[in-house]
Amino acid sequence: MDGVSNYQYVMNQFYQYILLMRLNRPIGIYLLLWPTLWGLWIAGDGYPDILVTVVFVLGVILMRSAGCVINDYADRNIDPHVRRTNDRPLATKRVSESEALILFAVLCLMAFALVLLMNILTIMLSMIAIFLAITYPFMKRYTHLPQAYLGMAFGWSIPMAFAAQTGTVPILAWWLFIANLLWTVAYDTLYAMVDREDDLAIGVKSTAILFGPADKIIVASLHLGMLLILFWIGQHLQFGIWYNLSLVGGLGLSIYQQWLIKERKPILCLQAFLNNHWLGAIIFVGIAANYSF
């Protein structure tokens, strides 16, 4: 019986770790993966190196998981007071603080081991990526712009992708980084709108609170800014009809998101946030199709 009990305990804790890494909710993986693939495909002229691609896809999964762990560790005393997060493993103490820190360290070490297969520039840039991942969760205590910091953390895979694929980080990579930064602030503001009332009550800062009644127009402007930069990039690279159609599709999705949030209902704001997965995907399809047809 002891063996069975131990097995059940181990399996239950493993499941709690899955929840802590939010592997059951892969939206964060998608939102980190799509711009990474944008960068890889453009840097590789449509045919990125297979090893580089595998390393970056696995790195996305590992670092997003690590980011969720350290985020919940930082918010372990906040999450119990927020309706959307009060049942998370650290908030309910189903996972201990030490377990969370060990899991975070293991995930970061696994990601870093993958990066060691890349060139020295990529390895150096990865140090900044780890720093951004560690520090991001604490930004909401000190600034109303944690979403912009998240944009830097999520977008850092773009210069890393160019570095791994080409050995350099051209100006074009930074423009792509800026486009992703604007997009991240837009969709994470939608996410923050879900928790705005709880965040106001407990003193947590966000762009949803900072923007106030201008939130919808600012989100729309951020989406438009992202699409304009992506259009300019496409013109610079002489991309064709497939890419431009993907941008039109992206514009349609951003308009749909505005329709969803018109009354700022939390459940619809969450739905608008989740819809950004398709926005990122359609742009990648446009980039890939441009090189394939």
Image: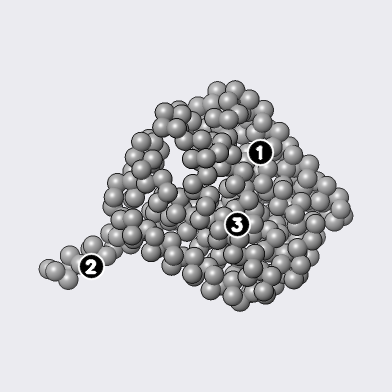
Q: How dense is the environment of label 3, judged by Cα within 10 Å: few (below 14), some, or many (20 and up)? A: many
Residue name at image x 60 percent, y 29 percent: 211
The answer to whether 181 is drawn above or below residue 209 in the figure is below
Q: Amino acid at mark 3?
A: Leu
Q: Residue 245 lies in what quarter of the image?
A: top right
Q: Quadrant of the N terminus?
A: bottom left
Name the mark nearer the viewer: 1 or 3: 3
Q: Nearer the viewer, residue 275 or 129?
A: 129
Residue name at image x 74 percent, y 39 percent: 225
Q: Amino acid at mark 1?
A: Leu
Q: Amino acid at mark 2?
A: Tyr
Residue name at image x 23 percent, y 63 percent: 8
Q: Secondary structure at mark 1?
A: helix
- Specify whether 47 is left or right of 99: right
Q: Secondary structure at mark 3?
A: helix
Can the viewer see residue 53 in this picture?
Answer: no
Instruction: State the residue lying farthest toward the bottom.
Output: 117
CA–CA distance in space, label 3 to label 2: 34 Å
Q: Which mark is residue 33?
A: 3
Q: Which mark is residue 253?
A: 1
- Specify whether 78 is left or right of 1: right
Residue 216 image point, x, y percent = 63, 28
Q: How dense is the environment of label 2, judged by Cα within 10 Å: few (below 14), some, or many (20 and up)? A: few
Q: Nearer the viewer, residue 232 or 206?
A: 206
Q: Quadrant of the C terminus?
A: bottom right
Q: Which mark is residue 7?
A: 2
CA–CA distance in space, label 2 to label 1: 46 Å
Residue 10 image point, x, y percent = 27, 65
Residue 169 image point, x, y percent = 75, 63
N-terminal-most mark, 2 or 1: 2
